[in-house]
Image (cartoon, grey):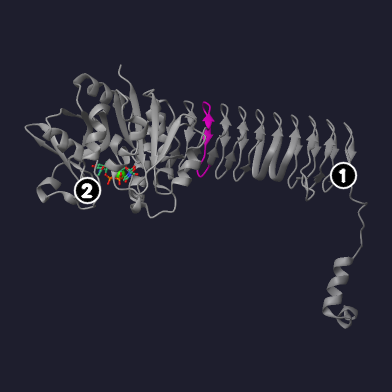
């Protein structure tokens, strides 16, 4: 196979987004738009990948700085897509083989489609091969003008005649070029059009005039080449990504009670017979096992749920692990580093952070468990608080297997509650509790007999009291 180089265009102003954030860094189902394009580009295993940036270049540089093999070029000023590709001349002019041109704002292109485009290009030996799509609403796209069935030129929306605007075959902005004639042809582009820009699609007309072969490949699913230029298009493309993911999940045996309100990021995995109720967000690298139930209004980010886990309504779970058979919620907040053991229970208004709750343990109501290691079969009573922060540093609480923490207790860390120990209700634990011991800090209870009667008397005045 001939050499292959990929160039991705992302220098444009993205005017229609009306944003201080570069368009290609806006998120689409949990990841930047550009991330999708970079992943697809990598599937071609090209010799080089070059990203052309310009508008808000520093922000994009920071976002891609960790990618060692990506070459980044700045186009300044941004004079159009043809001018953008010309910026790569220093790197690619004189190289042989093909250049695959991708648009940073066209994220849904499938690896299979791109491979097909490349093979078609190499088989035909064309100077350029354009990926096109037939769409119902061509507004905004460049239209493919054909003569005698062959692609003759591409006309932009703003430069098109009313008749050309009726054409429903559009330019995807994705092409393969033979590198040999490309750069001289780019230098010959003119900017005499509605936007005063050097249009890359004009190469088609110029090549045809010079009797160079230009081919086209039409995508089967037009959604693959949807471009994102506005917030409306971002929402529409997000919906397509979500719908595709939801259909995949349902085909794999997951019940979605209401797919229209189920938001699952593309990399999330869910096992069969899991039921997902409406209004659920499953984000990032979350993995969910089989036969789980995720009730309405739950958000789970970068977490692992084993099998038969129930997350009841309105929980937030982040960077956490929920072991098989555990039940969490409603209204629980599992912050990063929460680890809920097998068959453990975390009830309403419980917050956990960097805390392990061992197998079979329960924290059923109103608790804060932070920087804690809690063993198996522990009962954490309502209102228990691990006082992990002294204003400067965080400290650890350890509760060993079988311990019982009575309601409304404060465990002032660092502190250890030994196995099978008891902490009486309302205790402030400041020292370690040995295994099997009972800790209580309240003094003995005082009683004032007849206090209520006396209070009533004080309120209503002494005279009345005497009359009774
Ligand atoms: C472009 C095509 C249009 C096609 C559509 C498909 C042109 C002139 N038009 O239109 O035929 O139907 O894509 O989505 O090419 N860019 C730069 N430097 C610039 C200008 C743009 O790098 O000077 C980048 C943008 O950041 C973007 C891409 O090129 O990633 C396309 O530019 P955009 O302005 O979005 O073009 P469209 O109007 O969508
Ligand atoms: Ca675009």
Q: Which type of secondary structure does the marked residue at label 1 adopt?
A: loop
Which circle's residue, 2 or 1, is located before the other in the chain? Answer: 2
Pair 2/1: label in front: 2
Towards the viewer: 142 or 234:
142
Q: Quadrant of the N terminus?
A: top left
Instruction: Identify the residue shown where x is 80% and y is 31%.
Output: 400
Mark-to-mark CA distance, 2 and 1: 77 Å
Q: Is residue 375 above or below residue 369?
A: above
* Apparent side of residue 300 relative to residue 326 in the rendered image (left or right): left
Residue 290 is covered by the magenta coloring: yes
Residue lying furthest bottom:
463
Towards the viewer: 213 or 220:
213
- Residue receiving disc 1: 430
Residue 420 is covered by the magenta coloring: no
* Residue 54 image position (x, y, % from top left): 39, 46
- Residue receiving disc 2: 191
* Residue 143 image position (x, y, % from top left): 18, 42
Instruction: Identify the residue shown where x is 12% and y is 50%.
Output: 161
Q: What range of the chain is rendered magenta? A: 286-298
């Amino acid at each position: 196979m001939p050499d292959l180089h990929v160039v991705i265009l992302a220098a444009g102003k993205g005017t229609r987004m009306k944003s201080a954030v570069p368009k290609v860094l806006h998120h689409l189902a949990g990841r930047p738009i550009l991330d999708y394009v970079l992943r697809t580009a990598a599937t071609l295993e090209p010799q080089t990948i070059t990203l052309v940036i310009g508008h808000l270049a520093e922000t994009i540089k920071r976002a891609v700085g960790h990618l060692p093999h990506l070459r980044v070029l700045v186009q300044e000023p941004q004079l159009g897509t043809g001018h953008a590709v010309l910026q790569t001349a220093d790197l690619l002019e004189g190289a042989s083989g093909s250049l695959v041109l991708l648009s940073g704002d066209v994220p849904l292109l499938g690896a299979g489609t791109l491979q097909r485009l490349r093979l078609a290009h190499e088989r035909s030996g064309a100077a350029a091969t354009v990926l096109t799509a037939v769409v119902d609403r061509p507004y905004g796209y460049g239209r493919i003008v054909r003569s005698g069935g062959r692609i003759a030129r591409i006309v932009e929306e703003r430069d098109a005649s009313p008749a050309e605007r009726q054409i429903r075959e559009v330019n995807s902005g994705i092409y393969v070029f033979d590198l040999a004639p490309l750069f001289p042809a780019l230098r010959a582009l003119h900017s005499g059009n509605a936007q005063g820009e050097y249009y890359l699609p004009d190469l088609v007309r110029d090549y045809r005039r010079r009797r160079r072969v230009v081919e086209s490949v039409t995508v089967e699913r037009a959604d693959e080449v949807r471009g994102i230029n506005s917030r409306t298009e971002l929402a529409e493309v997000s919906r397509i990504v979500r719908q595709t993911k939801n259909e995949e999940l349902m085909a794999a045996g997951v019940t979605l009670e209401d797919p229209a309100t189920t938001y699952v990021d593309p990399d999330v995995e869910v096992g069969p017979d899991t039921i997902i109720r409406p209004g659920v967000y499953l984000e990032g690298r979350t993995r969910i096992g089989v036969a789980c139930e995720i009730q309405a209004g739950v958000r789970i980010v970068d977490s692992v749920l084993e099998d038969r886990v129930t997350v009841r309504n309105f929980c937030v779970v982040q960077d956490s692990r929920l072991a098989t058979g555990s039940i969490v919620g409603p209204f629980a907040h599992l912050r990063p580093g929460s680890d809920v053991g097998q068959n453990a229970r975390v009830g309403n208004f419980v917050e956990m952070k960097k805390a392990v709750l061992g197998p079979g343990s329960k924290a059923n109501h109103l608790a804060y468990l932070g920087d804690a290691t809690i063993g198996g079969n522990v009962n954490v009573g309502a209102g228990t608080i691990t006082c992990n922060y002294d204003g400067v540093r965080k400290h650890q609480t350890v509760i060993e297997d079988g311990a019982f923490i009575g309601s409304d207790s404060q465990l002032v860390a660092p502190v250890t509650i030994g196995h099978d120990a008891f902490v009486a209700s309302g205790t402030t634990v400041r020292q370690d509790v040995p295994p099997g011991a009972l800790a209580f800090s309240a003094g003995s209870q005082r009683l004032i007999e007849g206090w209520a009667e006396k209070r009533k008397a004080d309120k209503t005045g002494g005279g009345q009291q005497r009359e009774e």
